Amino acid sequence: MKSASELLEAYLNNVATPKVSAAQFAEDGVLELPWVNAHAQGPAAVEKLLTGLLAKVPDFRFKNLTYFIQTPDKVAAEYHVEAKVLATGKIYKQTYAGVLHAENGKIKLLHETLDTLAASKAFSKD
């Protein structure tokens, strides 16, 4: 059974393959980014959310994972993205903070926060 750290790493390392990242979630598992009003429940919805993101930012990849808290079923970490937004040509440079709750070897909840100003600047046309 995968630990919370193993689940987070599998999710982050496979974000370019949404089906693989989404497979880390329980059937009722949730990926939420409340500051940008994104909520996906279940692997199919998570896959759809990630696929939509990659359509806008094809080189979207997480890097520089730093853990702040690690237990077998919960982790808190920070990770980064730096990739070009197709529609604007701008670089999306972002730091994410994630808290993951694992249950029975799957992601039950991944709550991510981010700098909404950095996101707005990268995704909006001036």
Image: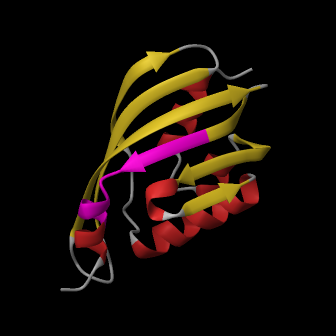
Residue pictured at 46% horizontal, 27% vertical: 76
Please give left or right for residue 70 compared with residue 42 in the image.
left
Residue placed at 21% from the left, 73% from the top? 90
* Screen quadrant of the C terminus: bottom left
Q: Quadrant of residue 85?
A: bottom left
Q: Is residue 68 left or right of residue 30?
A: left
Q: Position of residue 30 (x, y in %)?
A: 67, 47
Magenta-colored span: 110-119
Relative side of 108 to 37, left or right: right
Q: Quadrant of residue 123?
A: bottom left
The colour scheme of the drawn protein is secondary structure
* Above or below: residue 10 compared with residue 84: above
Residue at image location 51% in from the left, 55% down from the top: 34
Q: Does 107 sit above or below residue 56?
A: above
How far from the left and from the top, in percent, is residue 100? 57, 33
| Residue 80 spot, x, y in % from top left | 31, 44
Residue 92 place in picture, x, y as percent = 26, 63
Residue 111 magenta-highlighted: yes
